[in-house]
Image (cartoon, grey):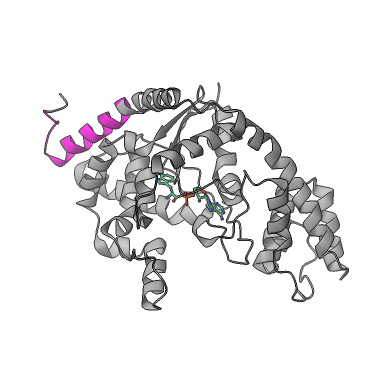
């Protein structure tokens, strides 16, 4: 391989099924990077999922389902290390150590935290789970995930851009204070995707009930897409360009989601045909929805088939997780030991 091998890391919380935002914002890049022969670490962020916990959830079961969906999408356990975040508990130690040098003011600027604060101020329902220490510290734990394997590249959707920038800042601060110890990851590309929700929200998100999922069957797909609000007159397009980057931001979000999905899934001439229909002021919402639903169901079919065909043997799943945790543990421990050493507390005598 002529290209330099990079270290890739990314994670997804096991908070439900994978949706199209997850797939096109992150998983698609996981697959491409895996095929380029990089060293890829993809994990299921079960610790992070606890920041929204209000009652006991069977995260283990959700983790297994996420694992099966990962593999059904094409993640290859031979080419990538696929593990569960909590099987690498030394991440929690790094989180603690990095937390010691991270200012609260810096964390308070985190968008996830700020959004929750705004909701709290507006007295919105916080599901009995307002602002936890874990939520404020979310970016530190995420930085620990990234820095512990010395990742160069972190494929994520646009909504996670700020978190990766915070990881870069934390690593830089650590290195300038204690000497070059941590690898600083690259910033997220400006082209990273933010797929709107089917309800017209700016982002498709698991907790917003506005997702199209990879495991949705054809009837569910059609129902969800038909339910997208398209009744208001969207007015003239406002651009002569047909390019999705010019067209989609001008559309109301729910229509933008439909056009974005069409562009991602259908041949380009199908997308262009619907841009033309819009521009000419034709009535097309019905056909847009049925055409898109067909493409979505076609895309989902092999994933659903592989998901259902995957074995559900508890013991082999546990063995799989154990083996993968073993693959990532040495590099992770090495980083934590280097950080302890750099900060002056020295190696762990327990581990030695
Ligand atoms: P999570 O579980 O919310 O989302 C997983 C991935 O899906 C992307 N994504 C989207 N991309 C485009 N449009 C959308 N509507 C959309 N919704 C979700 C996210 O950007 C993400 O890439 N904090 C992370 C998990 C995590 C992590 C990490 C990621 C924990 N530690 C370290 C990278 C590196 C999260 O909650 O993702």
Residue 116 sits inside the magenta stretch:
no
Q: Is residue 43 above or below residue 16?
A: above
Q: Report which quarter residue 251 is drawn in.
A: bottom right
Q: Report which quarter residue 248 is drawn in.
A: bottom right
Q: Residue furthest bottom?
A: 122
Q: Is residue 244 visible?
A: no
Q: Judge left or right: residue 203 versus residue 327.
A: right
Report the residue at 61% width, 28% height from top.
Answer: 309
Residue 5 % position (x, y): 48, 27
Residue 31 % position (x, y): 58, 34
Residue 276 % position (x, y): 86, 61
Frontmost residue, 70 versus 181: 70
Report the residue at 44% width, 22% height from top.
Answer: 316
Question: How many marks do you count on the picture?
Answer: 0
- Name the chief secondary structure element in magenta: helix
Report the residue at 62% width, 65% height from top.
Answer: 199
Q: Is residue 224 visible?
A: yes
Quadrant where the C terminus is found in the figure: top left
Q: Please state the extent of the stretch shown in magenta in the rendering.
A: 330-349
Q: Judge left or right: residue 204 versus residue 274.
A: left
Frontmost residue, 171 versus 273: 273
Q: Judge left or right: residue 117 versus residue 343.
A: right
Q: Is residue 347 above or below residue 95?
A: above
Frontmost residue, 120 versus 268: 120
């Amino acid at each position: 391989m002529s290209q330099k091998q990079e270290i890739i890391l990314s994670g997804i919380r096991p908070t439900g099924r994978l949706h199209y935002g997850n797939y096109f914002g992150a998983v698609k890049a996981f697959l491409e990077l895996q095929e380029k022969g990089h060293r890829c670490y993809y994990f299921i962020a079960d610790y992070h999922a606890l920041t929204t916990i209000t009652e006991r959830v069977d995260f283990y079961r959700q983790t297994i389902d996420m694992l099966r969906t990962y593999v059904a999408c094409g993640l290859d356990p031979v080419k990538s290390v696929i593990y569960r975040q909590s099987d690498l508990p030394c991440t929690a130690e790094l989180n603690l150590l990095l937390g010691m040098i991270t200012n609260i003011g810096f964390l308070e600027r985190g968008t996830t935290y700020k959004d929750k604060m705004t909701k709290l101020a507006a007295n919105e329902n916080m599901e009995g789970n307002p602002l936890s220490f874990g939520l404020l510290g979310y970016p530190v734990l995420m930085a620990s995930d990234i820095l512990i394997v010395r990742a160069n590249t972190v494929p994520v959707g646009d909504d996670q851009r700020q978190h990766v920038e915070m990881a870069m800042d934390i690593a830089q601060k650590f290195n300038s204070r204690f000497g070059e110890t941590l690898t600083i990851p690259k910033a997220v590309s400006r082209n990273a995707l933010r797929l709107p929700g089917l309800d017209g929200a700016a982002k498709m998100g698991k907790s917003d009930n506005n997702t199209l999922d990879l495991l949705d069957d054809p009837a569910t797909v059609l129902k969800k897409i038909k339910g997208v609000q398209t009744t208001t007159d969207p007015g003239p397009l406002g651009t002569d360009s047909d390019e999705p980057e010019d067209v989609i931001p001008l559309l109301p979000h729910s229509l933008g989601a439909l056009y974005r999905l069409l562009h991602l899934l259908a041949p380009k001439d199908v997308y262009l045909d619907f841009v033309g229909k819009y521009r000419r002021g034709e009535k097309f919402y019905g056909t847009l929805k049925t055409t898109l639903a067909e493409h979505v169901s076609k895309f989902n079919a092999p994933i659903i088939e592989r998901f259902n065909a995957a074995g559900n043997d508890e013991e082999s799943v546990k063995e799989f997780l154990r083996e993968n945790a073993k693959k990532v543990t040495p590099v992770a421990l090495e980083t934590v030991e280097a950080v302890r050493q750099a900060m002056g507390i020295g190696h762990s005598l327990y581990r030695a």
